[in-house]
């Protein structure tokens, strides 16, 4: 391997010196025709299922892992994958039965131990897994993962292995749609190699998905190859995928235009106005499970006092969402009409328009509502967001203009841009923000519960504004105890109506996933998590 | 000479300590990076506390600094958030940037000095004016403009080179980025050379040499150029450090996984080991380049002696 690399260097230096062209030596020089060449960024964390919480690492995990459930890439519906069935009679105790015949790509058989060990590892505080909180619904989580101090147990008391193909899970409370959350990669099974030689596994992770990792040069490239022994239905339709780390999405786009790359899943905003012309039909723009909102600091009395809900609703009505999504985002965002995402589909619990008139642009209504509620606290409002990514500065200015125009005052709304995401997040957690702040949410699993409970339930993990409403909490609890998903969805939607009344966060827009691809490949789609469905891509 | 070098090397120690402390302090001032690792979700307190402890973020600043320096002295530069050792990152990034710097330096030295000499010797003529005009234009175009434009024209439109550099970044692929990186410095080198050549060509010793009947090429290379190079060498010396550390824009445009990219990534993720480690090495490079420049003076001008 090393020798080969060096030999190529030498050849490239020579040809470069002789002909001053490097066409044959570029990244495109030694491509195999069956590989899909796709853009990538360096994952932030090590590639462990329970430690990966962003899209770049997620891409790889979607390719090399399959869990109990899998979300249909088109509809987002949760379907059994490794699970033969997941039974419950009381919405709290679940019995999981595995299908026979599944192995990891290193040949190890997948048993109920593969799951239970993986979940215990993820939940234990000592392992510092960033997705540990996904296991908080399981009984005994507070023992293995106390908020402070040392864990008093090593394993979750709620999990028990019955036999090779059966295990049981006991939850802390009723949670009827819990089985549908199990498609998230944090719940993937892990082979013994993960525990026995952790360092080696991290260098080259081994899973049970349609692809296996062929080579991994951290920070620069990963080559994945189709695993021919893959027992699932969703076998890869190409020979493999090469993920290439790009320093900048503009460069990836340029490389796509030059024919050195097949798939870019992040179209730079500066190119959005040309992308139709450049790529034609080979440009994808479809809803993803991401919503942007402006959350109010409900911990601040000036915003949470009674009567202020009118001001909050009024501010929402003062925002011209259509204009902003058209002009700034070129329709890669859709004006939001509720607090979830259309990517959920009907089955997941999405119902557009639940926000009602409060999310419709209405200058006169906005002005009178704000005046009725006693006006803006101190006569002004300041919007806060990090501005290092996502054109946040631009839309904040636009939202402020929109509000100022509606109120007929020049200085009613100002923006407070923060340089880095980390700084923004710290100010948010320490409750130092005194005006509305950006709150983005990317779903973990396509269920309405994931958009509501972590964000607006009293003291929930990501409830930064500290919104609290007993009626809302009660409806969420009832929804989780419902036996059917339809009934649960109806309750959750009822809970959303309370959000429309109280407006603890202004829904801004649903975010789309966008991608572009070369004419060399076909059947490119994005799943509801805005990750390309690599295994379906065909060459030619 | 030897004593001079030793003295200069010893002087580097306080500079090194001072600069690492300043950088450490500045990265620290950016705030706590742990919360951002959790994405949209609120950090879970138990995990966040353990990560902070691992990174020594729960200690006061001076203890963190002492701990970090202690690590550095044993050759351990810490770990980036993705689990890679910073020394590993350096081993992959510095050779790439070094190649890029070599390409850029060669280009600016060769083209810059030749243009400078030509226009200096033909002072006031049309060649001089056009070189002056071109350098003026080049200086005023920011790197990201020239970078994207040349990348699009040469890489996409004409397809002569690949627009993005592959991870191994061989010399052949670095020619275009190197030229882009060198463009602004090139203009400075040209102008500096032109001015000193123009000044020195009126000096007495040149008149004497002409009167002696020396051939013109000997006159220019041995007498005129050698005496005129001192300011140019000073500039190029400081430029080495600037090129190595300041290639952030160029490296991003051309997908070069070098020092600039790693620094950018480190700052964005607020990973202090990466940033401090890389900048520390850059400081050393800068100091050594300056020392080398000072020693070169003696070679260029025998009147300069170091004791």
Image (spheres, rainbow, N blue to C red):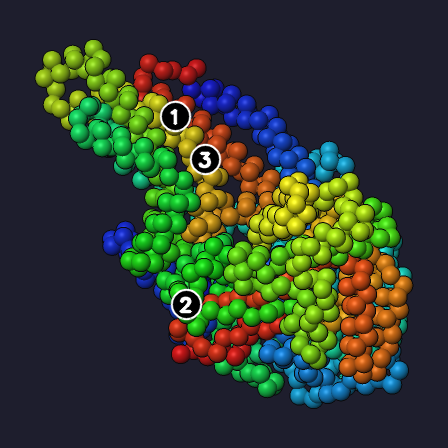
Question: Which residue is more in the foreground, A288 or A135?
Answer: A288
Q: Quadrant of residue A57?
A: bottom right
Q: Could you tell me how far apart the alpha carbons at marks 3 and 1 are, in whole angstroms?
A: 13 Å
Q: Position of residue A533 (x, y in %)?
A: 55, 74
Mark 3 element type: helix
Q: Position of residue A459 (x, y in %)?
A: 85, 58
Q: Are marks 3 and 2 on the same chain?
A: no
Q: Quadrant of residue A497?
A: bottom right
Which chain letter matches label 1? B
| Rendered residue at 40%/30% (across/down) | B237
Q: Quadrant of the C terminus of chain B?
A: top left
Q: Nearer the viewer, mark 3 or mark 1?
A: 3
Q: Nearer the viewer, mark 1 or mark 2?
A: 2
Which chain letter matches label 3? B
Identify the residue position indicated by label 2 in the image.
A279
Q: Which mark is residue B72?
A: none
> Is A136 on the left or on the right of B147, as rendered?
right
Identify the residue position indicated by label 1 in the image.
B234
Identify the residue position indicated by label 3 in the image.
B242
Mark 2 element type: helix
Residue A153 shows in the view: no
């Amino acid at each position: 391997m090393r020798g080969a690399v060096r030999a190529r260097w030498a050849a490239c230096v020579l040809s470069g010196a002789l002909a001053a062209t490097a066409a044959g030596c570029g990244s495109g020089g030694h491509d195999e025709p069956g590989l899909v060449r796709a853009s990538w960024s360096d994952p932030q964390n090590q590639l462990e299922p329970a430690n990966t919480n962003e899209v770049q690492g997620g891409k790889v995990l979607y390719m090399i892992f399959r869990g109990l459930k899998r979300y249909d890439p088109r509809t987002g519906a949760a379907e059994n994958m490794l699970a033969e069935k997941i039974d419950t009679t009381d919405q709290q105790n679940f019995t999981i039965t595995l299908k026979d015949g599944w192995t990891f790509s290193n040949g190890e058989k997948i048993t109920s131990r593969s799951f239970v060990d993986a979940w215990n590892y993820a939940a234990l505080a000592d392992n510092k897994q960033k997705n540990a909180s996904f296991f908080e619904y399981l009984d005994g989580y507070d023992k293995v993962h106390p908020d402070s101090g040392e864990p008093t147990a090593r394993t979750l008391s709620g999990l028990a292995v019955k036999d090779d193909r059966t295990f049981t899970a006991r939850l802390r409370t009723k949670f009827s749609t819990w089985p549908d959350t199990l498609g998230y990669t944090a719940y993937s099974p892990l082979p013994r190699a993960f525990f026995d030689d952790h360092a080696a596994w991290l260098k080259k992770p081994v899973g049970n998905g349609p692809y296996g990792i062929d080579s991994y040069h951290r920070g620069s490239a990963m080559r994945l190859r189709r695993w021919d022994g893959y027992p699932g239905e969703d076998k890869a339709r190409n020979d493999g995928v090469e993920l290439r780390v790009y320093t900048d999405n503009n460069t990836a786009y340029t490389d796509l235009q030059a024919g050195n790359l097949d798939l870019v899943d992040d179209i730079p905003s500066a190119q959005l106005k040309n992308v139709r012309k450049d790529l034609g039909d080979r440009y994808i723009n479809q809803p993803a499970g991401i919503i942007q909102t402006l959350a109010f600091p409900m911990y601040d009395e000036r915003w949470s006092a009674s009567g202020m809900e009118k001001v909050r609703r009024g501010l929402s009505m003062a925002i011209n969402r259509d204009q902003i999504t058209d002009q700034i985002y070129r329709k890669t965002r859709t004006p939001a009409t509720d607090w979830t995402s259309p990517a959920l589909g009907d089955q997941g619990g999405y119902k557009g328009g639940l926000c009602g008139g409060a999310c419709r642009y209405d200058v006169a209504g906005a002005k009178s509502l704000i005046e009725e509620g006693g006006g803006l606290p101190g006569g002004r409002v300041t919007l806060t967001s990090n501005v290092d990514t996502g054109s946040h500065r631009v839309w904040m200015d636009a939202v402020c203009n929109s509000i100022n125009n509606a109120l007929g005052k020049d200085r009613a709304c100002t923006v407070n841009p923060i340089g880095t995401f980390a700084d923004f997040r710290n100010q948010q957690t320490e409750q130092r923000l005194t005006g509305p702040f950006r709150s983005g949410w990317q779903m973990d699993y396509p269920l309405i519960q994931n958009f509501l409970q972590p964000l607006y339930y009293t003291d929930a993990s990501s409830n930064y504004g500290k919104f609290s409403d007993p009626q809302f909490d009660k409806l969420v609890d009832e929804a989780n105890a419902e036996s059917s998903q339809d009934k649960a969805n109806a309750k959750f939607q009822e809970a959303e109506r309370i959000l429309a009344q109280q407006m603890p966060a202004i829904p801004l827009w649903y975010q789309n996933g966008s991608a572009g691809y070369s004419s060399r490949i076909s059947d490119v789609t994005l799943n509801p998590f805005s990750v390309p469905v690599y295994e379906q891509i065909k060459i030619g | 000479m030897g004593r001079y070098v030793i003295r200069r090397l010893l002087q580097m120690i306080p500079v090194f300590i001072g600069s690492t402390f300043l950088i450490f302090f500045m990265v620290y001032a950016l705030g706590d990076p742990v919360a951002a690792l959790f994405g949209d979700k609120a950090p879970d307190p138990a995990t966040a506390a353990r990560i902070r402890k691992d990174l020594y973020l729960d200690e006061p600043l001076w203890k963190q600094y002492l701990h970090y320096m202690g690590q550095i002295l044993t050759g351990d530069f810490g770990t980036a958030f993705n689990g890679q050792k910073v020394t590993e990152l350096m081993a992959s990034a510095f050779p790439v940037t070094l190649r890029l710097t070599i390409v850029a330096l060669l280009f600016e030295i060769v083209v810059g000095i030749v243009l400078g000499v030509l226009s200096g010797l033909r002072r006031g003529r049309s060649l001089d004016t056009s070189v002056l005009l071109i350098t003026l234009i080049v200086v005023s175009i920011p790197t990201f403009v020239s970078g994207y434009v040349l990348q699009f024209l040469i890489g996409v439109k004409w397809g002569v080179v690949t627009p993005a550099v592959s991870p191994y970044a061989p010399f052949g692929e670095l020619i275009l980025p190197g030229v882009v990186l060198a463009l602004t410095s090139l203009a400075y080198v040209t102008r500096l050379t032109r001015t000193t050549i123009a000044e020195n060509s009126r000096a007495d010793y040149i008149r004497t040499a002409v009167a002696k009947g020396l051939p013109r090429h000997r006159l220019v290379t041995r007498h005129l150029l050698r005496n005129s190079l001192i300011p140019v060498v000073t500039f190029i010396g400081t430029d080495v450090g600037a090129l190595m550390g300041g290639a952030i824009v160029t490296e991003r445009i051309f997908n070069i996984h070098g020092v600039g990219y790693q620094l950018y990534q480190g700052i964005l993720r607020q990973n202090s080991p990466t940033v401090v480690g890389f900048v520390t090495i850059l400081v050393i490079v800068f100091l050594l380049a300056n020392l080398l420049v000072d020693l070169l003076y003696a070679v260029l001008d025998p009147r300069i002696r170091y004791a």
